[in-house]
Each structure stands twice: as C-alpha cells, then as structure tokens.
Image (tube, rainbow, N blue to C red):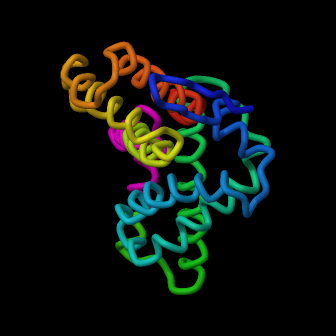
Amino acid sequence: MAQRFVSGNEDIMTDTSVSLLERLKYAERDGPDWRRMHDIYTPLVRKWIRRAPGLGHEADDLAQDVLVVVVREIARFERQREGSFRAWLRQITINRCRSHMKRRNRQFGKGARLNAAEEFLDQLEDPTGDLAIQWDRQHDEHVFRTLLKLIKADFTPVTWSAFRRFALDGEPASHVAADLKISENSVFLAKSRVLKRLRTEAAGLID
C-alpha cells in the first residue's frame, strides 16, 4: 500500500506498508527485497569476518554463506526482545565461521591462527562482551546509513534536500525553507516523512 504526500509543489510517493524484515518473510528469493537485504548486510558481515584471524581471505565466501542461511531461516525468525535480529545474525555469522574452521581442521589440522580465530569467535558470542557490544553499535550505525541511501529514491529532490540539511546537517529550518523556496512547515514535514519511512523500513532490524 502506497501513501501519497503533498507538500507545496511536491508530490511524494512512498511505500509505507511494512518493514523490510516482514517483507522478507514472503519475498521471492531473487526479488528486490532480498537484493536490498544483500546490499545492506554483506558488507557488514564481511567486515566482521575479516577481523577473525586467518579468515580474512575467505570473508567474501563466508559472508555469502551467512546470507544463504538468513534466506533459508528468515521465515522462522521471531523477534523476542530488543536487538533480537542483530543477535540472531551475529550467531549465524559465528556458526558459519566455526563450521568452516572445523572443515579446515579436518583437512589441514589446526594452526595458531585458527586458535586465535576461535578465541575471537568465543568473545564475539558473549552478549555482554566488548566485541558483541561493538557488533550491536556498528550494526545499527551501518543499517541506518545504508537504509538512508536506499530510501532516498522514494522522495523528491526537494524533500530529500530539506530533510538532509535540516535533520542531518543541522541548518535552521528558516534558512533551508528560504533557500529551497518552500515553507518552514514543509521542512518540518520533510523531516517527519523521511524519518517515518526510515523507521518503518528498519523496524525489527534496528530496535
């Protein structure tokens, strides 16, 4: 369901129906919602796998493995508390790395770097540890920034410029309105509409 907003001379069409997380549970696996999920999460997961000693050169393949599990299991995911999704994704990442390391151990034996990788994964698994806290913070920051880029196309250039300059850059609403030749109220509405769209899209991912 789409909702149309009118602000001055602007005509904005945005999809405000359900969150990305909810859409994924019913989405075609090669459809745009899964491509969006891939674009959001592959860089984040890959970055964290590269931090594990001895796994950096395999980070691309392992990140793809993580997303394959997410695709397979997403329909069964249920949010039970704040931060459930990012904790769920963190555990999938840890599990895929451990499975890969077990296969390597059987083939080549365990080296010092794999011992270090296991220690890194153990620390990442501890929900109260520094690494898990870093994961949570970086997850939310990364998803926020990436979703902002992805939803930009849902708004007219004037609306987006008003939002960016007022909400992100901190310019006074009066200055933004005068420069863009819109009312101050339109500046406030631009902020409200973009943030509403962002909250809807991010629901369950950032919470």
Viewer-side residue, 115 vs 198 = 198
Residue 72 placement, left or right of 198: right
Q: Quadrant of residue 30?
A: bottom right
Residue 20: x, y in percent? Answer: 64, 40
Residue 111: x, y in percent? Answer: 40, 77
Residue 129 visible in the shown view: no
Query: Is 130 included in the stretch rendered in magenta?
Result: yes
The residue under the point 42% across, 71% down is 55
Viewer-side residue, 134 vs 157 = 157
Q: How many marks?
A: 0
Q: Is residue 197 shown above or below 49? A: above
Residue 125: x, y in percent? Answer: 48, 45
Q: Is residue 145 shown above or below 18? A: below
The residue under the point 67% across, 62% down is 68
The residue under the point 79% across, 56% down is 28
Q: Please identify the residue farthest to the bottom as the structure is shown.
A: 108
Residue 118 placement, left or right of 32: left
In the rendered structure, which segment of residues is drawn in magenta? 118-139
Q: Is residue 91 shown above or below 68? A: above
Q: Quadrant of residue 77?
A: top right
The residue under the point 33% across, 39% down is 130
Residue 127 placement, left or right of 13: left
Q: Main secondary structure of the magenta part?
A: helix
Residue 66 visible in the shown view: yes
Q: Is residue 85 shown above or below 81? A: below
